[in-house]
Amino acid sequence: MNIDTERLAHLIETSDRIVFFGGAGVSTESGIKDFRSKDGLYNLRSKYGRPYEEMLSHTYFMNHTKTFYEFYREFMISTTAKPNKAHLYLAELEKRKNLTVITQNIDGLHQMAGSKNVLELHGSIHRNYCMDCYSKYDLNIVLNTNDIPRCPHCGGVIKPEVVLYEEPLDQEVLNSAVEAIASADLIIVAGTSLSVYPASGLIRFFNGRYIVVINKEHLYMNQDVTLEINRPVGEVFGELPKP
């Protein structure tokens, strides 16, 4: 371990209530593309005639559902991604620490690694529902069709339970996130640009002792940061002693 990871290990060990607040950069080492980096999804030339960011809006989903699903299957779903060292470390840490994972990701990798106390601010690709009868479906309903997935019961359009632009966050999840952050001793902000609201605004509720930032690029924050490590998230967690 270098001096930064030694200090991170000490902060984790001496904290009772920990929040891990993660963004797209947590999953890039699992092979999932992020959004806003130089090589991120939003900076790619769109093959659909509309910016990819626009295609993740509620309006686009409602008006161009078939094209949305073509894009969604290609860019938003990965059936080969596996948890990386960050996901695996946090799952182990949860077994002996009061840890809440708050994620902006929709890939389900934290749960795949074994984490139980996970708050998904933007939903999950693994949960889908009929917009007419509200029947629930897993990811297979989306994967097993090349067209618009429809409910076997009523024929209604099936929508991923992910938060698109123009849609509100789940209030219950939001309240739980605020409660966890407000009561934490340590918050680890990792792999996020903190540019997506209202999720990024949750950090202001932190009143604890330590703020750690792990991000490949410098992250500007209003609060005083205890420790900043500008390296890949999984790489850093891979150097920590086993929880």
Image: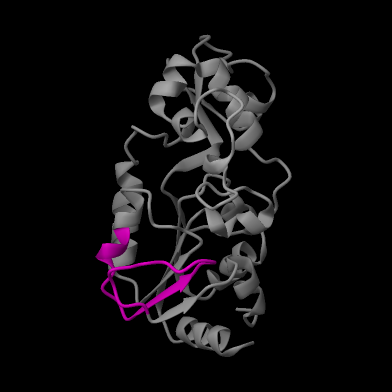
> Is 212 on the left or on the right of 198, as rendered?
right
Q: Nearer the viewer, residue 220 or 198?
A: 220
Q: Which of these two is toward me, 42 or 169?
A: 42
Residue 3 horizontal/vertical position (percent): 56, 90
- In which quadrant is the N terminus drawn? bottom right
Q: Which residues are magenta?
A: 202-225
Q: Residue farthest to the right?
A: 80
Q: Residue at the location (58% across, 71% down)? A: 231
Magenta stretch: dominant secondary structure = loop
| Quadrant of the image occupied by residue 187 | bottom left
Q: In the picture shown, does residue 241 fall above or below 213? A: below
Quadrant in the picture for the C terminus: bottom right
Q: Residue at x 52, y 57 (%)?
A: 116
Taking the magenta stretch, the answer to whether it contains residue 220 is yes
Is residue 185 found left or right of 192 in the rendered image? left
Residue 40 is covered by the magenta coloring:
no
Q: Is residue 203 left or right of residue 78?
A: left
Q: Where residue 21 appears, x then y in whole percent?
A: 44, 62
